[in-house]
Image (spheres, grey):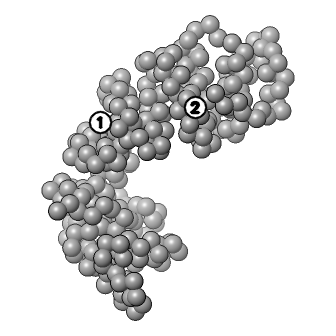
Amino acid sequence: MRIPALSTIFVLALTSLGNAQDFEALELQCANETMSTEDRIAACTALIDQAAYTDLEDYAVAHYRRGLAYQENGDLEGASEDLDIALDYDRYNYLAYVARGDVLLRLGDAYRAIADFTVAAGLEPLEPDPYVKRAIALQAHREYAQAVDDLRFAIQLDEQHRRARRVLAWLLSTSPQVGLRNGAEAINLTSEIDQDSAAVPDLMILAAVLAEAGDIPSSMEVYTAILERDAGARSRFERYLSTAGYLSSDASSETALPDAIRSCLEAGCRIGAPRPEE
């Protein structure tokens, strides 16, 4: 297990948990997500290493919280270790399953992430988040139909769930399994996206949705807006379109990129998405 560098404010607390004040302060600091990850890790470590608890469920919470801090700090292996321990101590810790699923997905293990999100959904069947997260893992595992089902169910649970609506709209517009695409449904899911104020990721979704709904001119307008707002968009678009065979490596005219985007959209390809399956 990783031993963090300790903030000076915790050095005295680590030497002894001899009074209730130290213990309560460490618990608050371990749980306080507004503090730095280093300080949270140090506080949680103090609680764990000094055997502050008598109940395994309390240790599960401390490991869970330290795992979150490791994850935020970019230490996915450390996060995975702590979340494994948290679930060894408490098999019914819904939040730990969700967190470990997130970590596993970031580590590229979509299959195990799906399993964790499935358990989380079983523990809290009326919470939409496990279904949304499982859908993202299923998409990474190329199980697109199951992902669509999960997202639709999540939206049944919470019609305004922003992430579920965005992910489903993207999948219904870009799925490599063309039979799953549904431009009309995707349009309804993105009705609140304002082209003038939306962030670039939302504009990418909107552009794909409009194309799938058959409105190529409006989709082209959105891609033009993206190119104007995002300095790195041109190179990303060019790489994608070149790889997909829509843009020649020696194309240098002003119309080459717009023509390539239009050809891609008309052929059913969507910038940033896997190519449709034959």
Quarter where residue 159 is shown: top left
Describe residue 56's horizontal placement relative to residue 102 as left or right.
right
- Which quarter shows the N terminus? top right
Q: Callout 2: 10 Å neighbours few (<14), some, many (20+)?
A: many
Q: Is mark 2 on a helix, strand or loop?
A: helix
Residue shown at the point (27%, 60%) measured from the top left: 174
Of the numbered discs in the image, which one, if any, rests on residue 67?
2
- Which quarter shows the C terminus? bottom left
Task: Reply above or below: 96 against 75.
Answer: above
Task: Reply above or below: 149 against 31.
Answer: below
Quarter where residue 198 is shown: bottom left
Q: Is mark 1 on a helix, strand or loop?
A: helix
Callout 2 touching callout 1 (CB < 8 Å): no
Residue shown at the point (15%, 56%) measured from the top left: 179
Q: Can residue 21 be seen in this view?
A: no
Q: Which residue lies furthest to the bottom in this view?
A: 253
Indicate the position of residue 26 as horizontal and vertical percent values. 72, 23
Describe residue 175's horizontal placement relative to residue 115 as left or right.
left
Of the numbered discs in the image, which one, if any, rests on residue 157?
1
Q: Can residue 249 be seen in this view?
A: yes
Total number of numbered labels? 2
Indicate the position of residue 206 as horizontal and vertical percent values. 33, 64
Q: Which amino acid does label 2 sit on?
A: Gly
Q: Residue furthest top?
A: 54
Q: Comparing marks 2 and 1, which lies closer to the viewer?
A: 2
Residue shown at the point (40%, 61%) measured from the top left: 202
